[in-house]
Image (cartoon, rainbow, N blue to C red):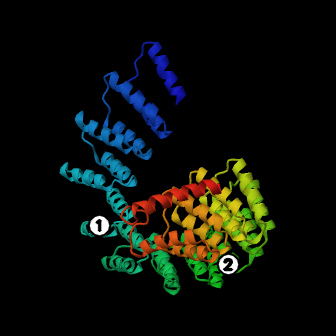
Amino acid sequence: MNGAQQVIQKMLVKGLNPDHVTYTILICGHCHYGNIEEALKLREEMLSRGFQLSVILYSVLLSSLCKSGRIEEALRLHYEMEAVGLEPDLITCSILIHGLCKKGSVQRAIQIYREMYVKRIIPHYSAHRAILLGLRERGDISEARKYFDALTTITEDVVLYNIMMDGYVKLGNIAPALQLYEQTVEKGITPTVVTFNTLMYGLCKSGKLIEAKRMLTAIELHGMLPSPVTYTTLMNGYCEWGNIHGMIKLLQEMKAKAVDPTHVTYTVIIKGLCKQRKLQKAVHLVEEMYAKDLIPDQITYNTIIQCFCRARDLKKAFQLHDEMLKHNLEPTPVTYNVLINGLCVYGDLNDADRLLDFLDDRNINLTKVAYTTLIKAHCAKGYALRAVELFDQMVEKGFEISIRDYSSVINRLCKRSLITEVKYFFCMMLSDGIYPDQELCKVMLNAFRQDGDIAWHLAIGKVVHWLINKVSVMSSQAYPISFRTRFLKRCKEMKSELA
């Protein structure tokens, strides 16, 4: 696009003014390459030179803004269009409806949809689909169903049925999805492979593998061919329910019918083999994938690495990690969570610490799970000081700390009778504005009683008392002011002393 702008500059130097067509070509080009800012600058330049944008140009700019998630700007442009006397057409309104629904602004999309009828613009089926999908995605299945029922009185679009079925299936409610399928049969609406894939997924989730398998036959009866997704969905169902033999038979059927497995298909099979501890066969399948030019992704490797960790073959797990790097496949935080967990549970805790420090030194992003895994392991081993260090690191990294994190640590420390450290974490928890639940108080109460720490036993006992009475732990109504003030003050002092 730089070359095109240079042409404009040369035109201006020679006294030639770019016309409406020139600007239209440039704006369309910038939008095509995602340079929305440059396109908007050219729009301003056009307006300053007295040109008026056409409906086509507005549509192009609206589409580009919506794709960039800049919905408010798109709406302003839409109303500007009307203000200058241009009537938005079917394409313009459809672009806005799609953009609003993707952004979650379904009600505003419905408003544009209603305005279309007022302006006697008949909405395209894609607008119907976008709104139904938007309602479903925001979790409003009952509202989506009302809209769907209204639509299906005026149109027989199988995609609307697919969207609605998928919504029910994702909620784990297969019965209404099957009822909708029966409606399509009654109305003579031809289902698609997606219809059957959706139902198959729902049936597999419900453990109805025989009914799911029947969907393969139904696809063929309708004169269609099962897709790789069809087979992969059914294979995953067999894998989840432990039918590895059935999964392998499906792979053979797939190959016999010349349906090419995808990398997802292989990942599902690898997961199944790993569940059966057939790790070498799983490794062989990874090699087969490369031979077929199917590149394993991070999920494939994470699956097999986790299984080697569980098999206590950490050497092979790290070899697979190195293989990822060799194939320019960036390990994910999940990869490192799996490796750290493997070292904590089946390997050397010091190696896990070194791995964390190595990754941290190289600014490799880790999730909170990596830290909590190590903290739990150190607490379980009785290495309280290291657990404290790691907990502080986790806080410094900006991870959100919850009652579950504190409970997990305190529970393990109580089991090891590390009372000083229990007090430290309890004080830290209170100073962070997080208060214990009844179960945690009982654990600490028992630990302090066994340790003979009467003062803390009594203090925690009072907390338990108010928790049993369902009163907020640190509210002014729950505790006498003198006790609450003294307790929190002592906790802060304890935290300073123990630090």
Q: Badge 1: few (under 14), some or many (20 or more) residues near its Cα, within 10 Å?
A: few
Q: Earlier in the sequence, mark 2 or mark 1?
A: 1
- Amino acid beneath label 1: Glu
Q: Nearer the viewer, residue 256 or 332?
A: 332
Q: Is residue 285 visible?
A: no
| Residue farthest along the top direction in this orientation | 14
SS state under label 1: helix
Measured as percent of width and height from the top left, residue 422 is found at 61, 66
The label on residue 143 is 1
Apparent side of residue 55 relative to residue 197 in the rendered image (left or right): left
Residue drawn at the location 63% of the way across and 69% of the way down = 261
Measured as percent of width and height from the top left, residue 233 is found at 55, 74
- Amino acid beneath label 2: Lys
Q: Which residue is mark 2?
A: 275
Residue drawn at the location 64% of the way across and 64% of the way down = 421
Residue drawn at the location 60% of the way across and 73% of the way down = 448
Apparent side of residue 46 relative to residue 437 in the rendered image (left or right): left
SS state under label 2: helix
Picture quarter with the C terminus? bottom right
- The quadrant holding residue 101 is bottom left
